[in-house]
């Protein structure tokens, strides 16, 4: 149980980061849905893993959209944007990469993905 929690930690952190992002955007419904969705990680079904994988890819695309918008805003204001690209670029990669944890043998077995 503890090991599976550690394996799922990137997924949990990515979902919480997305929830924080949407909270800042004022999308309370999305925040509630994302946080509530974490409870689905207790359900051992293949479709749960696939939904999380799709959601994490979409979440990474949302971070990428946000990154591009922020670059444009900062350039228009004449502000530095390079460091922000590194930080949010890492968040994009981390979020999308979190979808890959379901490929680990232990999680493939847990979610009946074989």
Image: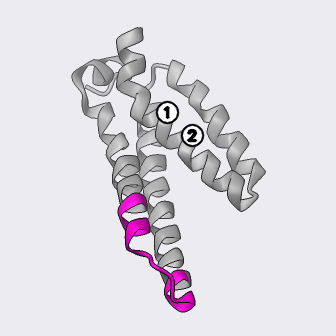
- In the rendered image of this protein, does residue 27 appear above or below residue 84? above
The quarter of the displayed image where residue 34 is located: top right
Relative image position of residue 72 (x, y in whole percent): 50, 84
Front position in the image: 35 or 109: 35
Give the numbered dot on residue 43: none
Q: Which residues are magenta?
A: 74-87
Question: For residue 105, which quarter of the picture?
Answer: top left
* Residue at far left of view: 105
Q: Quadrant of the N terminus?
A: top left
Q: Which residue matches tag 2?
A: 16
Q: Which residue is mark 1?
A: 12
Q: Label 2: few (<14), some or many (≥20) within 10 Å?
A: some
Q: Residue at x 51, y 25 (%)?
A: 41
Residue 18 in percent (x, y) is at 56, 49
Residue 75 shown left or right of residue 35 in the figure: left
Is residue 79 magenta-colored? yes
Q: Is residue 84 above or below residue 109?
A: below
Q: Is residue 95 left or right of residue 102?
A: right
- The secondary structure that most of the magenta stretch takes on is helix
Q: Give the structural element (helix, strand or loop) at label 2.
A: helix
Name the quadrant of the C terminus.
top left
Which residue does the image show at 41% across and 48% down from the upper left? 95
Q: Position of residue 24 (x, y in %)?
A: 69, 56
Q: Position of residue 2 (x, y in %)?
A: 41, 10
Q: Say few, some or many: other residues with alpha carbon within 10 Å of mark 1 (under 14 / 14 to 19 / 20 or more).
A: many
Residue displayed at 52% across by 20% down: 43
Residue 82 magenta: yes
As measured in the structure, the alpha-carbon distance from the residue carrying label 1 to the one carrying label 2 is 6 Å
Name the residue at 36% across, 42% down. 99
Identify the element where label 1 is drawn: helix
């Amino acid at each position: 149980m503890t090991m599976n929690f550690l394996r799922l930690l990137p997924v949990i952190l990515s979902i919480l980061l997305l929830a924080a992002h949407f909270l800042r955007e004022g999308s309370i419904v999305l925040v509630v849905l994302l946080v509530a969705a974490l409870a689905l990680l207790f359900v051992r079904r293949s479709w749960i893993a696939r939904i999380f994988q799709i959601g994490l890819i979409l979440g990474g695309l949302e971070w990428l959209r946000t990154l591009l918008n922020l670059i444009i805003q900062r350039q228009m204001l004449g502000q530095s944007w390079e460091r922000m690209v590194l930080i949010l670029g890492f968040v994009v990669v981390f979020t999308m990469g979190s979808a890959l944890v379901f490929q680990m043998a232990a999680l493939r077995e847990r979610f009946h993905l074989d």
